[in-house]
Image (cartoon, coloured by chain):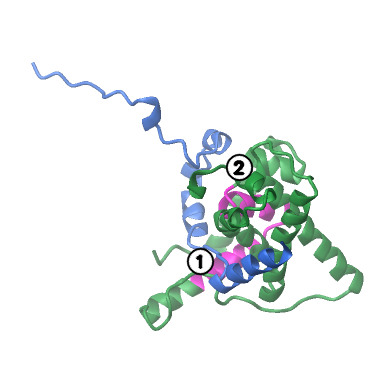
Chain colours: A green, B blue
Amino acid sequence: MKKTMSDYELIELFVKGEQSCFDELIRRHKNKVFAYISLYIRDQALAEDLFQDTFLKVIQSVKSGKYYDNGKFISWVMRIAHNLIIDHFRRVKQLNTVSNDDYESDLFNSRKLAEANIEDHLIKRQIQKDIRKLISELPDDQREVVILRHYSGLSFKEIADITDVSINTALGRMRYALINMRKMMEEKKISLTFN
Amino acid sequence: MALTSTPFLSYHEIQVENIDIYEDAFGFCQEFSDVINLLEQLKPVPKKRLTKRLIERVRQMN
C-alpha cells in the first residue's frame, strides 16, 4: 500500500503520526542520497553521519512546516544534503584540517567475499576504485552534475535547480565531464573489463 | 501478397521511465556509452545497519 503512495502522501501521513511512512521514504530515497554524499566525502564515517543528518534535518523541516509539495521531494532532500556537505567543507576550511582518510571499502554492495569468485571480486573492486578516482579528479562543477545525474537519478531540470544554473549550463558541464572522463580513461588505460 | 506492417505502439507502451528529455536530446547515452557503462559499475549503497540505525533514530525523535 505505502509503496504505491506518492512522497507527499507519505509526508502528510507521517506528520499526522504515521511513523512507518517516513521509513518508506527512507527506503525509497536512501540510495540516491547516500550515493551523492559518499562520492563527495571520502571519510566513510563522516559520510554516514551526513547521510543520517540529512534525513533528520528533513524531519525537522517537515515538522516545522517548511516543506511545500511541488512534486520535487527528492530534489529538496538533495538540496539539504548539498547544503550539509558545503557546511562541512566550510567547517574543515575554518579548522584548516584536511581529511586523508583513504576509504574504499564496503560501499559497493558487492556479494560477500566468501561467496564470490575472489578474482572477479578483486577486479570489480579495482574498477570501482578507478571510477571513484575518475570522478574525484573532475572539476567540482562537473563532478556534481555527474553524481546528481548518474548516482542520484535527478533530471537535468532538477540538477539545474539544485546547483542554481541553467539547464544548458548543467548539460554543458555534463558534456565536459564525459569528455574529460573519457580522456582520463584513455590515459589511465581504464576499460570495462568486468561485467 | 505478403503484407508487412509496422505495429503501432500505444501511449502506455512507450518507455519513458528514467528518460531525461534533455539528456536524450543531447545524445549523451549514444555518444558516451563507454563512459556511462563504466559509471554504472559503481553502485554506492548504504549498509543495512546504517539504514536500520537511521530508522531507529527517526523513531526516537518522535
Badge 2 amino acid: Glu
Q: Is residue A135 magenta?
A: yes
Q: In the picture, which quadrant includes the C terminus of chain B?
A: bottom right
Circle 1 SS class: loop
Q: Is residue B6 visible?
A: yes
Residue A75 falls left or right of residue B51: right
Badge 1 amino acid: Lys
What range is drawn magenta here? A126-153
Q: Nearer the viewer, mark 2 or mark 1?
A: 2
A174 w.r.t. A195: above or below: above
The one nearer the camera, B25 or A150, is: A150
* Residue position marked by numbered label 1 in the rendering: A189
* Most frequent secondary structure within the magenta stretch: helix
Q: Which chain's residue wears label 2?
A: A
Residue B33 falls left or right of residue A34: left
The one nearer the camera, A61 or A131, is: A61
* Residue position marked by numbered label 2 in the rendering: A9
Q: Residues within 10 Å of mark 2 (few under 14, many from 20)?
A: few
Number of numbered labels in the structure image: 2
Image location (x, y in percent) of residue B1:
8, 16
Q: Residue furthest left?
A: B1
| Residue drawn at x 55%, y 75% as measured from the top left | A106
| Residue drawn at x 39%, y 81% as measured from the top left | A118
Q: Which chain's residue wears label 1?
A: A
Image location (x, y in percent) of residue A30:
59, 59
